[in-house]
Every structure is written in structure tokens, then in C-alpha cells.
Image (spheres, helix red, strand yellow):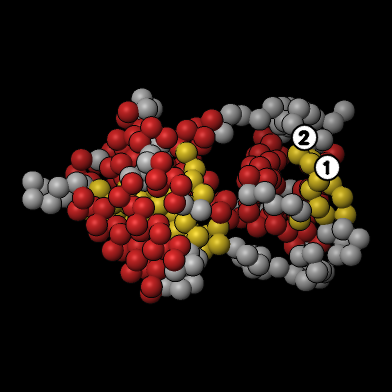
Amino acid sequence: MKPDPADLGSDGRTKGRNGMNGERKLAMFMDFENIARGVKEAQYKQFELKLVLERLLEKGKIIVRRAYADWNRFTEYKRPFHEWAIELIDVPQSRYSGKNSADIRMVVDALDLAYGKTHIDSFALVSGDSDFSPLVSKLRENDRYVIGLGVKSSSSDLLVANCDEFIFYEDLIRDTKKTTLLRGLPEKKAEAMAQLIDAIQALQRENKETLWGSMVKQTMIRKNPAFNESYYGFSTFSKLLEEAAKQRIVSLERDEKSGTYVITALTEEGGRAA
């Protein structure tokens, strides 16, 4: 059985489910008390964990997920954090330890992981606290890529400047606007196309110059490990891309060398094909 061309790289060789060269392996460390305070000050109803993880999954595979706080103060968040497989590190506050005890524990754990797990090449620090600036510098000194993420109003300019890149929580909220591209499509097909659009937008945010079909599919699987084009009625991923082109959601070209599809554009204002 021949492989689906959309599962081939630009050199024509088959890529595994997680075998795309250059996929980052991330460790996420969250200073939840800082984030919760920032969300409250910005007057958001609640912290949307799903938005944070979905954006980080665009960067690569999250190997380690840890969140630090006095969890007796945030019991309403325990269930959703467990559902997203995040390890809750409980650091109870006391008049002796003060607020920095969670920060110190997070720094020690992050450095321990950096020295002990060399396959983890990227760290996502979900906090805006300037106290983590020395940690960022040490991680970068050890050739780790550092992504910061925090609420703008409670994020230190020093921390933002020290990171390789910084994502503001406010931008994640703005990016949740619904697309108009899927109006009138059957529910199952619309669901597949929504995941496709989401993956393409993720890669565009990462400034990928060439959007290979295999790259897009890998991003879709990373964001939703249960994704399978056959569930949505497509025999191959190439057929899904062809349907997206037919519905004027994307523009496609075939790479002459490998025969694989390249997505050349995502329609911004189109709808269903006539």
C-alpha cells in the first residue's frame, strides 16, 4: 500500500506520526498564583487553561506539565488541571515561607529537568514574574529555547525581554473568534475543516515559509491526538485537503519533486464553493 502523499516530507520519504524533523519537546512550568492574580486584575471571568495549552502545543510536544501554587486556595481549578494531565505541585503558604517558596521550588525543578533531561529542548514558563528572569538566562545559557506566557498587566518587561518569545494571554483570548469559512458545511466536515484551519493558522504564527501537507497533519495530531481523517470520511489526508480546496477554504499546489500538497493560502473571507 502506497503512503498518502500528504504524509511524505519534501524529500518524498514517509514521516511517522511524530517524526517530523524539528518538532520541539517542551516542559511547561506554571506559576499559577501569578497567572491567577493577573487574570483577576484584568477582570477576566476565569483562567482558560485550554487556550494556553492549545497555543503551546503549536510549538511542539509537551513532555512535562507542572503547575505550582497553594492549591487549597484554588480548589476550583484542580479538576480541569487534572483533566489536562498537569501535575499539581502544592506549595502551601505560611508566614515563614512567603510567596517566594513556590517560585524557588519551580526554579529548582526547572533547572533539575534541564540538566537531567537533555532531550527536552524548550521550556514554557507561564508567569509574568520578573523573579524568573535569572532562570530564563540560565536555561538559554544551556541552549534551551524559552517561551514565556503571561497576562500583560502583570508581566515584567524584564522577563518579556529575556525570553526567546513571549505570548500574552490577552492575545489568546482575542484569537478565539469563530471563523466564517465553515458556514453551511455538514457538522462532521465542518469539524475537520475547523481543525485544519486551526493548524494552518498555528503554522503561520510560527512563520513557516512552506506549509507541507505532512506538516499540517502533524500539527493537527499534536493538538488533537485522536485526529484521523478517516473518521471524517476521507480515505487519505490528501482527500481532506482537496475537499478544503473545493470548498475554497485553502489554495493548494503540488510539489513537483515529491508529489505532496503544499498549502499556499488560507481563504480569509470565502465560504462554500458553489
Residue pictured at 35% horizontal, 58% vertical: 135
Using residue 21 as the reference point, say whether residue 63 is left or right of it.
Answer: left
SS of the residue under disc 1: strand
Residue type at mark 1 is Ser
- Looking at the rendered image, the quarter that the N terminus falls into is bottom right
SS of the residue under disc 2: loop
Residue farthest to the left, as pictured: 95
Nearest the viewer among 128 and 68 is 128
Label 2–label 1 contact, CB within 8 A? yes
Q: Would you identify the image quadrant in which residue 43 lies? A: top left
Q: Would you identify the image quadrant in which residue 38 lies? A: top left
Marked residue nearer the N-terminal end (2 or 1): 1
Give percent across and percent down for residue 143: 49, 67
Residue type at mark 2 is Thr
Residue pictured at 89% horizontal, 65% vertical: 257
- Other-residue count near label 2 (Cα within 10 Å), few / some / many at <14 / 14–19 / ≥20: some
Tag of residue 75? none
Query: Is any atom of residue 224 visible in this view?
Result: no
Q: Is residue 265 above or below residue 106?
A: above
Give percent across and percent down for residue 56: 51, 50
Q: Is residue 54 above or below residue 217?
A: above
Query: Is any atom of residue 14 visible in this view?
Result: yes
Nearest the viewer among 128 and 244 is 128
Residue pictured at 51% horizontal, 53% vertical: 164
Give percent across and percent down for residue 261: 82, 54
The residue where tag 2 is placed is 267
Nearest the viewer among 108 and 263 is 108
Measured in 3D between alpha carbons, the distance from the residue under mark 2 to the one under mark 1, in whole angstroms, is 8 Å
The residue where tag 1 is placed is 251
Residue farthest to the right, as pictured: 256
Give percent across and percent down for residue 19: 64, 68
